[in-house]
């Protein structure tokens, strides 16, 4: 159906795609994997018409194809479901599904809302989802919004008679297992009239849903395999050039924490979110909080980070009682917060690496009340080397970095600010296995420097692997705590028993 031949693309001296060949056949799911910065997103943007290659060709059903825009791609039956989602949260489900296509329901300048809503219900019925299409999109869960994205892509069936190609860019990155299974069931049901490209860092999911898999590295396609003929560890080794070994979580570097108590919470409560939480955090200690969505663990970290004011209990930092009503107050007490939504809360995406690194501590680069750009550049260059941030220079905007490198910039900011307590809220979300391993190395480095870390992770395995102790929460309460020393990590089953 869709064939890419010898595609090349460069940005600011970085060769993002190098002679990439790829083909998508009828009624199949093609997996696409690779480390952050391997070129996957660039390839997807070219296939979706939002970027054009420097050279190389596309063809559709054997005919040459030139895509000048996303609308152009849509006219040829190619749609994309974006990782960051393209929905507008302040309008209804129906309006989002037909955003940009309102003309179909407009006569004499007046929109026939009843007809649009009926059409939106038909699109949702294609994927077996029953939603009130008048609902404001902001009121939906992330998983439900992802289904609306898929329904939106399927509206292309009305503008073309040919089978669709749907590009899925990290659609499962923030979904729980139950929601992933729903999505995969919809994809399998739609294979009779569409082909899919599925991009994900979760290799087990790629193997589960794909028919064929392409592996990218440094802008090149380095391997193609039938999903049934390859394993997750084999894909990992092709991607990063080394096998997935027992030291993935750097357990051998886990040292005993100091006695110095940096953070203490007693009876901490936020009405409607969690209650009576006791927590201690020592210098060099990593404490993981395990729990399902709605357990209260995210709210606990946001309260300590100053985003969610407490309604009861107390917090002590270095033995002194504190009460945060803003994140700024927490920062002044040496608490840094690395959010799960790094593109929304973690970075100012259109600003440079250097500017983002120094934002939380401008005093470090000020001279006479004015920013000393020479000092700022020197500081940023130092972090670029120390954290091995892959970028052509420190002046490039953070929006042009891969997810793993964006996460390193956020870490560099809080280390520049001198944070001795770090809250890591899903620090490896959306990162490939190689970038995750680098983050684990950084966690061990920070711990060795005496930084105390409060961790919420995407997986229970990651939480156990990194933590000195694991707290378990359920329905807003702490239900158990497990010591997790090297060589004596708790069993996942025991923790799960306390989570559900």
Image (cartoon, rainbow, N blue to C red):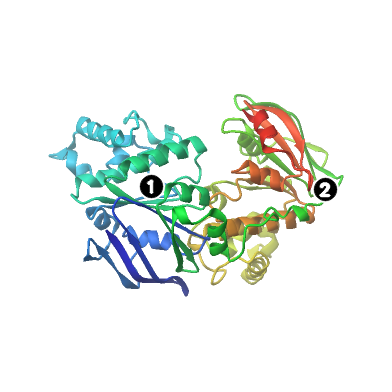
In the rendered view, tell whether residue 123 sits above or below residue 367: above
| Residue 185 on image: x %, y % | 39, 38
Residue lying at the far front of the rendered structure: 229
Secondary structure under the numbered disc 2 in the rendered image: loop
Report which quarter residue 73 is drawn in.
Answer: bottom left
Q: CA distance from mark 1 to mark 2?
A: 44 Å
Secondary structure under the numbered disc 1 in the rendered image: loop
Res. 86 mark = 1
State which tag comes first along the sequence, 1 or 2: 1
Seen at 26% across and 43% down, the residue is: 155
Task: Describe residue 448's horizontal placement relative to residue 463 as left or right.
Answer: right
In this view, the mark in front (1 or 2): 2
| Residue 336 on image: x %, y % | 67, 48
Seen at 27% across and 62% down, the residue is: 67
For this rendering, which residue is in front, 345 or 234?
234
Report which quarter residue 497 is drawn in.
Answer: top right
Classed neighbour count for the residue bearing mark 2: other residues with Cα under 10 Å, few (<14), some (14–19), many (≥20): some
In the rendered view, tell whether residue 358 sits above or below residue 462: below
Q: How many marks?
A: 2
The quadrant of the image that shows the C terminus is: top right
| Residue 489 on image: x %, y % | 75, 43
- Residue linked to disc 2: 257
Camera sees residue 149: no
Res. 410 mark = none
| Residue 172 on image: x %, y % | 47, 45
Task: Describe residue 105's horizontal placement relative to residue 386 as left or right.
Answer: left
Camera sees residue 86: yes
Residue lying at the far left of the rendered structure: 108
């Amino acid at each position: 159906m869709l064939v890419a031949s010898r595609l090349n693309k460069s940005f600011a001296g970085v060769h993002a795609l190098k002679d990439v060949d790829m083909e998508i056949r009828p009624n199949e799911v093609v997996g696409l994997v690779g480390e952050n910065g391997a070129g996957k997103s660039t390839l997807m943007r070219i296939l979706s018409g939002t970027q054009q290659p420097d050279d190389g060709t596309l063809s559709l059903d054997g005919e040459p194809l030139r895509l000048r825009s996303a609308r152009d791609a849509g006219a040829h039956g190619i749609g994309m479901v974006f990782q960051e989602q393209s929905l507008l949260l302040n309008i209804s489900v129906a309006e989002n599904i037909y955003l940009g296509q309102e003309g179909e329901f407009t006569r004499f300048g007046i929109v026939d809302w009843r007809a649009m809503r009926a059409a939106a219900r038909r699109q949702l019925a294609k994927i077996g989802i029953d939603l009130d299409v008048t609902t404001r999109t902001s009121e939906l869960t992330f998983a439900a919004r992802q289904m609306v994205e898929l329904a939106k892509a399927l509206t292309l069936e009305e503008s073309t008679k040919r089978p669709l190609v749907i590009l899925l860019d990290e659609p499962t990155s923030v979904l729980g297992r139950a929601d992933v299974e729903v999505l995969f069931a919809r994809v399998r049901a739609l294979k009779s009239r569409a082909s899919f490209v599925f991009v994900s860092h979760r290799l087990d999911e790629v193997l589960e849903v794909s028919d064929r898999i392409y592996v990218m590295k440094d802008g090149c396609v380095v391997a193609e395999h039938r999903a049934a003929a390859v394993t997750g560890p084999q894909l990992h080794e092709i991607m990063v050039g080394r096998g997935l070994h027992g030291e993935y979580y750097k357990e051998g570097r886990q040292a005993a924490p100091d006695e110095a108590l940096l953070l203490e919470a007693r009876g901490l409560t936020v009405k409607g979110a969690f209650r009576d939480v006791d927590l201690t955090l020592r210098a060099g200690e990593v404490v993981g909080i395990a729990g399902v969505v709605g357990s209260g663990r995210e709210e606990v970290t946001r309260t300590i980070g100053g985003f969610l004011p407490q309604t009861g209990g107390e917090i002590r930092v270095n033995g002194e009682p504190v009460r945060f009503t803003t994140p700024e107050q927490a920062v002044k007490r040496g608490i840094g917060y690395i959010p799960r939504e790094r593109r929304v809360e973690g970075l100012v995406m259109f600003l440079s690496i250097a500017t983002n690194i120094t934002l939380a501590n401008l005093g470090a680069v000020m001279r006479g009340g004015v920013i000393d750009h020479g000092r700022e550049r020197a500081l940023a260059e130092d972090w670029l080397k120390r954290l091995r941030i892959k970028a052509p220079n420190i002046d490039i905007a953070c929006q042009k970095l891969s997810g793993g490198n964006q996460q390193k910039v956020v870490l560099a900011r809080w280390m520049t600010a001198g944070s001795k307590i770090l809250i890591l809220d899903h620090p490896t979300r959306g990162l490939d296995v190689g970038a995750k391993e680098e983050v684990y190395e950084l966690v061990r480095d920070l711990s060795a420097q005496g930084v105390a870390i409060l961790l919420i992770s995407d997986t229970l395995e990651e939480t156990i692997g990194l933590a000195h102790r694991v707290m378990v929460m359920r329905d807003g309460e702490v239900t158990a705590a497990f010591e997790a020393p090297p060589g004596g990590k708790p069993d996942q089953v025991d923790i799960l028993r306390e989570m559900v």
